[in-house]
């Protein structure tokens, strides 16, 4: 059985055939390009980084629509361009960017299944260096953000607090904490390989179920697991399509990865991301926190 929306994924064979397709733009999305894009990247790939092109330059938020459009045009992307995103070795930030592309209404955006991990294992062609392709800026791309859909994609802290107080979490609403088990229990507040986002306390939101993002992918190739395995994975924890689902992690990149799995691969109708995640909740005065293995 195929995924609910197989059109949002491309495999490495498809990518090899379309590296020079003028209707396609491949974009690498990194947390730190020094350890990824600048070491090697797919031929012709443009670069987006979380710090420079996704988050707002002043407040804790995302780039405004006009700035997003400017970044697209600089990379030769128009509204009708097929955009293929891939990321550093786990595709976290590619999924995060995919989420933002959908918030801003881009029609045809897809993920490279397996990202850098699969491409490297297959010895796919690469380029290296610290410069992006400049020819993208000369193709005359025009981009306009025609709609903005935060309501269908994003959840704020106040909403989760309200739903928690009403006793909805664990019933009609499933809250999925996709972080590692040690983050969920409160032993640590950030993955050891990433800078700490300075949460003051550790633990999880009461009622949240811990299903680490990594359980959805093949550890050897980084590819998403088959649809039946994914369905079993989430249903055994009571995460079923009849419920509203909210995902969260630390700063939302892993939450976006699981959101992608639930919404596009399994076809769940109501999935959103709490992008404030633990970086916000773990600093919010008075917000309830639970430690240990139980929801």
Image (tube, rainbow, N blue to C red):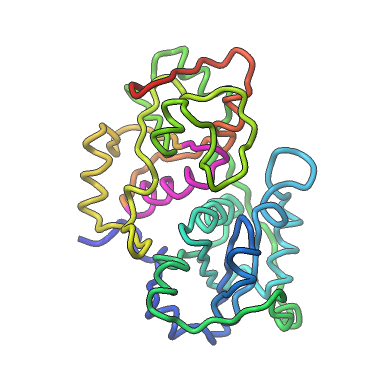
Residue 262 in percent (x, y) is at: 36, 46
Q: In which quarter of the image is residue 179?
A: top left
**In the rendered view, would you say 266 is above or below 209?**
below
Say which residue appears at 38% left-offset and 78% top-offset.
122
Residue 254 in percent (x, y) is at: 48, 46
**In the rendered view, would you say 113 is above or below 271?**
below
Residue 191 in percent (x, y) is at: 51, 41
Does 249 lie within the magenta span?
yes
Does 232 lie within the magenta span?
no
In the image, is 111 to the left or to the right of 70? Answer: left
Say which residue appears at 47% left-offset and 65% top-offset.
110
**In the rendered view, would you say 170 is above or below 87?**
above
Location of the N terminus by quadrant is bottom left
| Front-most of residues 18 and 224 | 224
Q: Give the range drawn in magenta.
A: 248-265
Location of the C terminus by quadrant is top left
Residue 290 in percent (x, y) is at: 44, 18
| Front-most of residues 27 and 81 | 27
In the image, is 65 to the left or to the right of 246? Answer: right
Say which residue appears at 57% left-offset and 75% top-offset.
41
Q: In which quarter of the image is residue 52?
A: bottom right
| Front-most of residues 57 and 204 | 204
Say which residue appears at 71% left-offset and 38% top-offset.
60
Which SS type dominates the magenta stretch?
Answer: helix
Callout count: 0
């Amino acid at each position: 059985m195929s995924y609910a929306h197989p059109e949002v994924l491309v495999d490495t064979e498809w990518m090899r055939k379309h590296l020079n397709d003028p209707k396609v733009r491949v974009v690498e999305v990194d947390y730190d390009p020094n350890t990824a894009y600048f070491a090697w990247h797919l031929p012709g790939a443009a670069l987006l980084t979380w710090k420079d092109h996704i988050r707002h330059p002043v407040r804790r938020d995302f780039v405004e629509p006009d700035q997003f459009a400017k970044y697209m045009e600089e990379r030769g992307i128009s509204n009708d361009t097929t955009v293929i995103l891939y990321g550093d070795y786990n595709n976290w930030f590619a999924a995060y960017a995919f989420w933002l592309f959908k918030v801003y209404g881009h029609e045809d955006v897809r993920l490279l299944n397996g990202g850098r991990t699969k491409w490297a294992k297959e010895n796919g062609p690469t380029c290296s260096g610290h410069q992006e392709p400049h020819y993208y800026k000369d193709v005359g791309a025009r981009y306009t953000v025609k709609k903005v859909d935060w309501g269908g994609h994003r959840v704020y802290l106040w909403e989760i607090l309200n739903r928690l107080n009403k006793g909805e979490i664990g019933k009609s609403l499933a809250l999925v904490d996709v972080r590692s088990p040690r983050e969920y229990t409160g032993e640590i507040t950030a993955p050891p390989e990433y800078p700490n986002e300075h949460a003051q306390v550790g633990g999880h939101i009461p009622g949240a179920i811990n299903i680490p993002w990594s359980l959805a992918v093949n550890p050897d190739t980084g590819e998403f697991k088959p649809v039946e395995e994914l369905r079993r994975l989430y249903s055994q924890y009571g995460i079923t399509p009849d419920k509203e689902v909210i995902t969260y992690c630390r700063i939302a990149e892993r939450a976006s990865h699981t959101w992608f799995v639930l919404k596009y691969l399994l076809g769940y109708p109501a999935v959103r991301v709490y992008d404030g995640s633990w970086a916000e909740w773990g600093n919010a005065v008075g917000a309830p926190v639970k430690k240990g293995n139980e929801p």
